Image (cartoon, grey):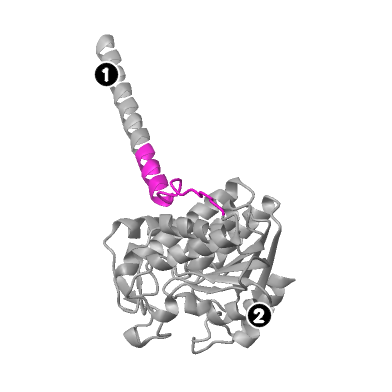
């Protein structure tokens, strides 16, 4: 009888042990799945590879090479724009337009910097600027292409000016933030309303959402459901690609990961935000600023007050609610001081 009780007790104990082991395995699986979902995919593959131009002539050759690569069906106002004083000057500036826009967005601001003596370079982002505003080409955008684009433009600018400034807005600001993190030959990076995340998506869901939209089939959605294809400006795409937005966010997560580890390479950084911006997530921008400051970056921040009532795109003069005579003088003052 005693032996039977002992055997029963051992079996009971073994059963409890197996249940605990199964529970531990289950919990570990759940944790691993959670970490996988919440961790942005594919960011470690993004690397900067600088090849700076050594002269003005070399920079111009590279600009002409970029022009030859432009698709013949480009909107004429969206082609690469190069405002030159016909030689290297003290300061060069690279202006990086936002997602779904094109170089025309920065044309007026670029002219103002040119009038101040800058050499100015405004190049279209990959798959941008096509005359067919309903093109599906934009869905092919990859974070890797934005990394190459950033390197190419900073490389070229080394031959255009003794000091190099790079300015980007929204998706272009994420590209500029990448350059700020990686390029030590960038004197000033100006990051305007960066799209590290979107207000429509909670911060905690941004990473899993990015992963999800990278594997789901692409879909196109209207920026404005009421205006649809009639939404302006006419040099912009009226739709966005879920896959393209996910790739911009992917690059943004690469910037955030690098900012947690390392001091940014750029000599100076200016982060400009807009208190009335209803598009991008300010919390994620604040996190990057915090990380940079903790790594002793030479960083300045400026916020346009809500009272100005500025739109997310505060650069393009073709926006119906533009206020460039409020924005431009302040930006120019911050950049040139």
Badge 1 crowding class, 10 Å Cα cut-off, few under 14, some 14 to 19, many 20 or more, is: few
Bounds of the magenta segment:
27-52
Identify the image quadrant of the N terminus.
top left
Badge 2 crowding class, 10 Å Cα cut-off, few under 14, some 14 to 19, many 20 or more, is: few
Q: Give the x, y percent position of residue 228.
A: 33, 84
Q: Give the x, y percent position of residue 202.
A: 46, 64
Q: Residue at x 61, y 64 (%)?
A: 160
On screen, residue 1 versus residue 176, left or right, reads left
Return the residue at label 2.
Answer: 115
Label of residue 334 in the image: none
| Nearer mark to the viewer, of 1 and 2 | 2
The vertical placement of 6 against 268, above or below, is above
Q: Residue at x 36, y 75 (%)?
A: 74
Return the residue at label 1.
Answer: 8
Residue 335 in view of the camera? yes
Task: Report if residue 284 lies within the magenta region.
Answer: no
Residue 284 in view of the camera? no
């Amino acid at each position: 009888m005693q032996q039977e009780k002992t055997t029963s007790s051992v079996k009971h104990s073994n059963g409890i042990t197996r249940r605990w082991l199964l529970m531990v395995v289950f919990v570990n699986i759940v944790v691993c799945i959670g970490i996988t979902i919440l961790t942005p995919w594919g960011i470690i593959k993004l690397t900067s590879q600088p090849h700076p131009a050594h002269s003005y002539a070399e920079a111009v050759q590279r600009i002409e090479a970029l022009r030859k690569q432009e698709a013949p069906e480009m909107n004429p106002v969206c082609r690469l724009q190069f405002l030159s004083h016909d030689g290297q000057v003290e300061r060069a500036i690279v202006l990086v337009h936002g997602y779904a826009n094109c170089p025309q967005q920065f044309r007026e601001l670029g002219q103002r910097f040119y009038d101040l003596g800058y050499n100015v370079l405004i190049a279209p982002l990959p798959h941008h600027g096509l005359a067919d505003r309903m093109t599906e080409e934009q869905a092919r955008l990859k974070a890797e292409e934005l990394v190459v684009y950033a390197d190419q433009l900073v490389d070229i600018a080394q031959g255009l000016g003794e000091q190099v400034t790079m300015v980007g807005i929204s998706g272009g600001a994420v590209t500029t933030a990448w350059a700020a993190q990686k390029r030590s030959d960038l004197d000033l990076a100006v990051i305007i309303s960066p799209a590290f995340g979107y207000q429509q998506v909670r911060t905690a869901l941004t990473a899993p959402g990015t992963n999800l939209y990278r594997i789901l089939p692409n879909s196109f959605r209207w920026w404005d459901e009421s205006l649809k294809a009639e939404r302006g400006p006419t040099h912009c795409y009226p739709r966005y690609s879920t896959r393209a937005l996910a790739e911009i966010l992917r690059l943004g997560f690469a910037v955030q990961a690098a900012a947690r580890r390392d001091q940014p390479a750029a000599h100076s950084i200016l982060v400009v935000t807009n208190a009335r911006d209803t598009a991008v997530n300010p919390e994620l921008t604040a996190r990057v600023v915090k990380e940079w400051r903790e790594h002793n970056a030479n960083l300045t921040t400026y916020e346009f007050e809500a009272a100005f009532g500025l739109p997310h795109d505060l650069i393009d003069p073709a926006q119906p609610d533009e206020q460039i005579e409020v924005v431009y003088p302040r930006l120019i003052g911050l950049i040139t001081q």
